[in-house]
Image: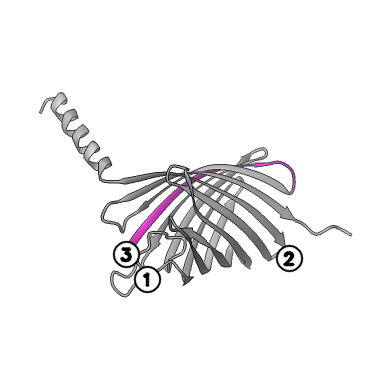
Protein backbone atom coordinates (compact mmCIF):
# COMPACT_ATOMS: atom_id res chain seq x y z
CA UNK A 1 0.00 0.00 0.00
CA UNK A 2 1.34 3.41 -0.99
CA UNK A 3 1.99 5.97 1.71
CA UNK A 4 -0.52 8.36 0.09
CA UNK A 5 -3.30 5.77 0.31
CA UNK A 6 -2.41 4.92 3.89
CA UNK A 7 -2.55 8.59 4.91
CA UNK A 8 -5.91 9.01 3.16
CA UNK A 9 -7.40 6.06 5.03
CA UNK A 10 -5.96 7.31 8.30
CA UNK A 11 -7.34 10.82 7.78
CA UNK A 12 -10.83 9.42 7.03
CA UNK A 13 -10.67 7.26 10.15
CA UNK A 14 -9.62 10.19 12.35
CA UNK A 15 -12.29 12.52 10.96
CA UNK A 16 -14.96 9.84 11.47
CA UNK A 17 -13.77 9.22 15.02
CA UNK A 18 -13.80 12.92 15.90
CA UNK A 19 -17.22 13.52 14.35
CA UNK A 20 -18.66 10.75 16.55
CA UNK A 21 -17.74 12.62 19.71
CA UNK A 22 -19.24 15.56 21.56
CA UNK A 23 -16.63 18.10 22.58
CA UNK A 24 -16.94 20.87 25.13
CA UNK A 25 -14.51 23.49 26.38
CA UNK A 26 -14.94 24.58 29.98
CA UNK A 27 -13.50 26.68 32.77
CA UNK A 28 -13.47 25.56 36.40
CA UNK A 29 -12.55 28.10 39.06
CA UNK A 30 -12.33 27.46 42.78
CA UNK A 31 -11.13 28.75 46.11
CA UNK A 32 -9.62 26.42 48.71
CA UNK A 33 -9.57 27.40 52.38
CA UNK A 34 -7.89 24.97 54.78
CA UNK A 35 -6.97 24.85 58.47
CA UNK A 36 -4.69 22.44 60.29
CA UNK A 37 -6.49 21.56 63.52
CA UNK A 38 -3.43 19.60 64.65
CA UNK A 39 -0.59 17.60 63.09
CA UNK A 40 -2.99 14.89 61.90
CA UNK A 41 -6.29 16.61 61.11
CA UNK A 42 -6.97 19.18 58.39
CA UNK A 43 -10.39 20.68 57.60
CA UNK A 44 -11.28 22.64 54.47
CA UNK A 45 -13.97 24.61 52.66
CA UNK A 46 -13.83 24.84 48.86
CA UNK A 47 -16.43 26.75 46.81
CA UNK A 48 -16.27 26.30 43.02
CA UNK A 49 -18.17 27.21 39.88
CA UNK A 50 -17.85 25.61 36.47
CA UNK A 51 -18.51 27.06 33.02
CA UNK A 52 -19.48 24.77 30.15
CA UNK A 53 -20.74 24.86 26.54
CA UNK A 54 -17.47 26.41 25.36
CA UNK A 55 -17.37 28.71 28.40
CA UNK A 56 -20.71 30.29 27.46
CA UNK A 57 -22.81 29.39 30.52
CA UNK A 58 -22.57 28.33 34.17
CA UNK A 59 -22.79 24.55 34.33
CA UNK A 60 -22.69 23.98 38.09
CA UNK A 61 -21.93 25.70 41.39
CA UNK A 62 -21.14 23.95 44.66
CA UNK A 63 -19.15 24.02 47.87
CA UNK A 64 -17.16 21.21 49.51
CA UNK A 65 -16.74 20.79 53.26
CA UNK A 66 -14.00 18.27 53.91
CA UNK A 67 -11.64 16.71 56.43
CA UNK A 68 -8.44 14.70 56.05
CA UNK A 69 -6.90 12.65 58.83
CA UNK A 70 -3.37 11.25 58.70
CA UNK A 71 -3.40 7.66 59.91
CA UNK A 72 0.39 7.30 59.92
CA UNK A 73 3.01 5.64 57.70
CA UNK A 74 1.73 7.56 54.65
CA UNK A 75 -1.91 6.45 54.97
CA UNK A 76 -4.78 8.93 55.27
CA UNK A 77 -8.59 9.01 55.42
CA UNK A 78 -10.93 11.63 53.97
CA UNK A 79 -14.57 12.65 54.27
CA UNK A 80 -16.30 15.33 52.18
CA UNK A 81 -19.80 16.76 51.87
CA UNK A 82 -20.71 18.65 48.69
CA UNK A 83 -23.80 20.77 48.18
CA UNK A 84 -24.61 22.68 45.02
CA UNK A 85 -26.73 23.02 41.90
CA UNK A 86 -26.60 21.82 38.27
CA UNK A 87 -27.77 23.94 35.35
CA UNK A 88 -30.72 22.28 33.62
CA UNK A 89 -31.12 25.03 30.97
CA UNK A 90 -34.36 26.50 32.34
CA UNK A 91 -33.66 25.89 36.05
CA UNK A 92 -30.96 24.85 38.52
CA UNK A 93 -31.33 21.41 40.10
CA UNK A 94 -29.97 21.11 43.64
CA UNK A 95 -27.36 18.40 44.24
CA UNK A 96 -25.77 16.82 47.30
CA UNK A 97 -23.25 14.06 47.82
CA UNK A 98 -21.07 12.42 50.47
CA UNK A 99 -17.63 11.03 49.82
CA UNK A 100 -15.43 8.78 51.98
CA UNK A 101 -11.93 7.69 51.06
CA UNK A 102 -8.70 6.00 52.02
CA UNK A 103 -5.33 6.74 50.47
CA UNK A 104 -1.58 6.37 50.62
CA UNK A 105 1.16 8.91 49.88
CA UNK A 106 4.82 8.12 49.24
CA UNK A 107 7.37 10.94 49.25
CA UNK A 108 11.05 11.03 48.32
CA UNK A 109 12.85 14.38 48.27
CA UNK A 110 11.04 16.55 45.68
CA UNK A 111 8.71 13.85 44.34
CA UNK A 112 5.56 12.37 45.85
CA UNK A 113 3.17 9.73 44.55
CA UNK A 114 -0.29 9.12 45.96
CA UNK A 115 -3.27 6.86 45.43
CA UNK A 116 -6.78 7.41 46.76
CA UNK A 117 -9.83 5.14 46.67
CA UNK A 118 -13.09 6.94 47.34
CA UNK A 119 -16.73 5.91 47.58
CA UNK A 120 -19.11 8.65 46.49
CA UNK A 121 -22.80 8.54 47.36
CA UNK A 122 -25.48 10.77 45.87
CA UNK A 123 -27.93 12.20 48.43
CA UNK A 124 -30.04 14.35 46.10
CA UNK A 125 -29.85 14.63 42.33
CA UNK A 126 -27.17 12.73 40.44
CA UNK A 127 -29.54 9.92 39.54
CA UNK A 128 -28.50 6.82 37.67
CA UNK A 129 -27.83 7.60 34.02
CA UNK A 130 -26.67 11.12 34.75
CA UNK A 131 -23.40 11.99 33.01
CA UNK A 132 -22.12 14.20 35.85
CA UNK A 133 -19.64 11.87 37.56
CA UNK A 134 -19.04 14.39 40.35
CA UNK A 135 -22.49 13.85 41.88
CA UNK A 136 -23.69 10.34 41.04
CA UNK A 137 -23.06 7.30 43.25
CA UNK A 138 -19.78 5.87 42.05
CA UNK A 139 -16.32 4.55 43.04
CA UNK A 140 -13.33 6.77 42.21
CA UNK A 141 -9.66 5.77 41.89
CA UNK A 142 -7.05 8.51 41.62
CA UNK A 143 -3.29 8.33 41.03
CA UNK A 144 -1.28 11.55 41.40
CA UNK A 145 2.34 12.64 41.06
CA UNK A 146 3.82 15.91 42.40
CA UNK A 147 7.17 17.60 41.89
CA UNK A 148 8.37 20.39 44.21
CA UNK A 149 11.95 20.84 43.02
CA UNK A 150 11.45 24.37 41.65
CA UNK A 151 11.42 27.24 44.16
CA UNK A 152 7.88 28.51 44.87
CA UNK A 153 6.32 26.10 42.35
CA UNK A 154 4.62 22.72 42.58
CA UNK A 155 3.88 20.74 39.41
CA UNK A 156 1.41 17.88 39.46
CA UNK A 157 -0.46 15.48 37.25
CA UNK A 158 -3.18 12.96 38.06
CA UNK A 159 -5.26 10.28 36.40
CA UNK A 160 -8.64 9.29 37.82
CA UNK A 161 -11.13 6.67 36.69
CA UNK A 162 -14.70 6.09 37.82
CA UNK A 163 -16.35 2.70 38.34
CA UNK A 164 -20.03 1.79 38.52
CA UNK A 165 -21.54 0.49 41.77
CA UNK A 166 -24.74 -0.77 40.10
CA UNK A 167 -25.70 -4.43 40.41
CA UNK A 168 -25.54 -4.70 36.63
CA UNK A 169 -22.06 -4.09 35.20
CA UNK A 170 -20.58 -3.56 38.67
CA UNK A 171 -17.12 -1.90 38.61
CA UNK A 172 -17.47 -1.09 34.91
CA UNK A 173 -15.43 1.97 33.86
CA UNK A 174 -17.77 4.91 33.26
CA UNK A 175 -15.49 7.94 33.08
CA UNK A 176 -11.84 8.93 33.23
CA UNK A 177 -10.16 12.26 33.97
CA UNK A 178 -6.57 13.46 33.41
CA UNK A 179 -5.22 16.67 34.92
CA UNK A 180 -1.98 18.64 34.77
CA UNK A 181 -1.45 21.65 37.03
CA UNK A 182 1.12 24.20 38.21
CA UNK A 183 0.81 25.94 41.60
CA UNK A 184 2.75 29.04 42.62
CA UNK A 185 3.43 29.93 46.22
CA UNK A 186 2.83 33.64 46.86
CA UNK A 187 3.76 33.43 50.54
CA UNK A 188 3.42 30.98 53.43
CA UNK A 189 -0.37 31.07 53.32
CA UNK A 190 -1.43 31.95 49.78
CA UNK A 191 -1.18 30.00 46.52
CA UNK A 192 -2.52 30.33 42.98
CA UNK A 193 -2.78 27.58 40.38
CA UNK A 194 -3.39 27.05 36.69
CA UNK A 195 -4.10 23.75 35.02
CA UNK A 196 -5.75 21.78 32.25
CA UNK A 197 -8.14 18.84 32.44
CA UNK A 198 -9.41 16.32 29.92
CA UNK A 199 -12.22 13.93 30.77
CA UNK A 200 -14.32 11.46 28.83
CA UNK A 201 -17.72 9.93 29.47
CA UNK A 202 -17.48 6.26 28.44
CA UNK A 203 -21.11 5.48 29.25
CA UNK A 204 -22.89 7.50 26.54
CA UNK A 205 -23.64 6.05 23.11
CA UNK A 206 -21.85 9.09 21.68
CA UNK A 207 -18.60 9.57 23.65
CA UNK A 208 -18.47 13.02 25.26
CA UNK A 209 -15.14 14.72 25.89
CA UNK A 210 -14.47 17.81 28.00
CA UNK A 211 -11.43 20.06 27.76
CA UNK A 212 -11.25 22.31 30.79
CA UNK A 213 -9.01 25.14 31.97
CA UNK A 214 -8.50 25.12 35.76
CA UNK A 215 -7.92 28.32 37.76
CA UNK A 216 -7.58 28.21 41.54
CA UNK A 217 -6.64 30.10 44.67
CA UNK A 218 -5.75 28.54 48.04
CA UNK A 219 -5.33 30.05 51.50
CA UNK A 220 -4.03 28.14 54.51
CA UNK A 221 -5.14 29.32 57.93
CA UNK A 222 -2.57 28.73 60.66
CA UNK A 223 -2.63 29.06 64.40
CA UNK A 224 -0.88 32.11 65.79
CA UNK A 225 2.19 31.20 67.76
CA UNK A 226 2.21 32.25 71.39
From this viewpoint, which residue is outermost toward the front?
90
Place of residue 44 in the rendered image (x, y in percent of width and height, measured from the top left): 65, 61
Is residue 123 shown above or below 222?
below
Question: Can you give x and y, in whole percent of width and height, for residue 16 in the image?
Answer: 22, 40
Q: Which residues are magenta?
A: 172-188
Which quarter of the figure is the C terminus placed in? Answer: bottom right
Q: Earlier in the sequence, mark 3 or mark 1?
A: 1
Residue in the foreground of this view, choosing between 157 and 82: 82
Seen from the viewer's position, the closer of residues 189 and 103 is 189
- Categorize mark 2 by other alpha carbons within 10 Å: few (<14), some (14-19), many (20+): few
Magenta highlight on residue 178: yes
Residue at the disc numbered 1: 165
Q: Position of residue 29 (x, y in %)?
A: 57, 48
Residue 82 lies left or right of residue 206; in this view the side is: right
Extreme-bottom residue of the structure: 167
At a point 56% along the width and 56% down the height, the residue shown is 106
Using the rendered view, name the quadrant where residue 202 is placed: bottom left
Q: Which residue position holds label 2?
A: 37
Return the residue at label 3: 172
Per the model, the C-alpha gap separating discs 2 and 1 is 34 Å
Amino acid sequence: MKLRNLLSILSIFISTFLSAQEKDAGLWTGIGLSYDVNKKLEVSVSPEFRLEENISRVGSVFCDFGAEYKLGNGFFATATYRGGAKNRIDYFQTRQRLQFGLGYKWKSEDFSISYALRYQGSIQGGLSGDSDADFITIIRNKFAVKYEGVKKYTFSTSYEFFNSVALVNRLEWQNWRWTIEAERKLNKRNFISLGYLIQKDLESSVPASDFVVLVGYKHIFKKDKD
